[in-house]
Amino acid sequence: MPSANKLQRWTDLLAALLRRSAAVDFDALRREVPAYADASRSRDALMRMFERDKDELRSLGVPIESVKDEEGNLSRYRLGSRQFYLPYLQLVADAGRPPRRPRGPGYQSLSVLAFEPEELDAIARAAHRVAKLGDAALAHEAMTALRKLGHDLPVPPVGGELVQLEQVADADALDRIADAVRRRKRIRFTYRSMHRDEESDREVEPYGLAFITGHWYLVGRDTDADARRQFRVSRIGDLEVNNTKAQTMDFSVPGDFELGAHARSRQAWELGDAEPEDVIVRFRIESGVTKPAMQLGEAVAGDAAARRFRVRRPDTFALWLLGFAGDASVVSPTTMSTRLLELAQATRARYPEVA
């Protein structure tokens, strides 16, 4: 993992190159990359630092090109935008309309990839079939690909609804929360709970923002509960950032917290601000459907077919269990067994012709 200083240099270097369509020399880059203008180091030492950064970025796939100067020396550099950016995505029906491109050099030259509605439907069906093959990692990648397409296109999943980004009610909230995360400042807000559907005041130490299952979530420590929680941003209102001693951190993020790992490991029933409840489920057979499901839970000592799940949204978890058509049964608690039975009975009553 690169150090924070190196990541900052890489970011500054890429920003300097992206601002230009023409190739520039090292002296021009020094004026925009603070680390390359360090007066305490010689120009040769700074040039070697730049060369290492350039080579490391190239090894990661960043297309930094070396261009000859007037004397034929490869002393100028530019970023190949056609190789650096993905093409713009459009529907064929919209192909006559120019895509909404960001302003700046390099963007206007990018290509456009157009899809027929039938092609999007085929992609969605293929991704859902891959997700059902029984490999949890493969399923995750397939659905992640669909969500990425959904940023730009109305991708129809098998159920018929559109896979698109959630429209956050207060678009400014994300920027303000991100700033609080960066400065490590506590925030206060009102929150409408997903579990109880009631509004309450919260004070949170924000650890980060994560995009999970199609929604933005704030992850942090709820100071009143003294516990780690996640809050859907669209349910946050009356947001206030503690600006007392604006340049002083209010808290430190625990050393064992990693936002990426937290986001990857979250399932729909784990999201929310309610106290988690341990639910033990026994799977009847280990098949292509139940095997990846068992991988989502923790092993239970003495029962190879049982798994423990931490559930914050019981209704969502019951719906998930119902999909196993009897191949998953609740061991404990009894409240979850009752909830699953009631859900099964309600479903059967709704579709009497197939009961």
Image (cartoon, rainbow, N blue to C red):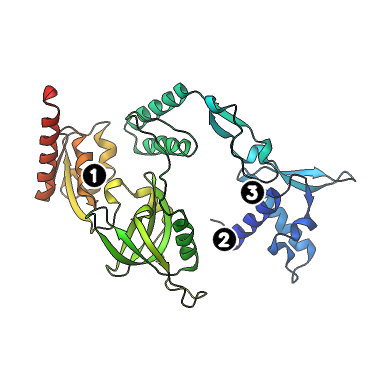
Which residue is depicted at the point 20% across and 34% down?
324
| Front in this rendered view, residue 343 or 309 | 343
Upstream in sequence: badge 2 or badge 3: 2
Residue 105 lies in what quarter of the image? top right
Q: Badge 3, how many Cα within 10 Å: few under 14, some, many 20+?
A: some
Residue where numbered disc 2 is placed: 3
Q: Badge 1, how many Cα within 10 Å: few under 14, some, many 20+?
A: some
Residue where numbered disc 1 is placed: 316
Which residue is depicted at the point 48% across and 39% down?
151
Disc number placed over residue 57 in the picture, else none: 3
Q: Could you tell me if the residues under marks 1 and 3 are in contact, i.e. CB atoms within 8 Å?
A: no
Q: Badge 2, how many Cα within 10 Å: few under 14, some, many 20+?
A: few
Secondary structure state at the residue bearing disc 1: helix
Which mark's residue is nearer the viewer, 1 or 3? 1
Real-space CA distance between mark 2 and mark 3, rounded to the nearest whole angstrom: 14 Å
Q: Which percent across, then down, holds residue 347? A: 15, 33
Residue 75 visible in rendering: yes
Upstream in sequence: badge 1 or badge 2: 2
Which residue is depicted at the point 9% across and 49% down?
334
Disc number placed over residue 156 in the picture, else none: none
Residue 253 visible in rendering: no
The C terminus sits in image quarter: top left
Name, please, the residue furthest toward the right: 71
**Relative side of 323 to 39, left or right:** left
**Relative side of 326 to 142, left or right:** left
Real-space CA distance between mark 1 and mark 3, rounded to the nearest whole angstrom: 43 Å
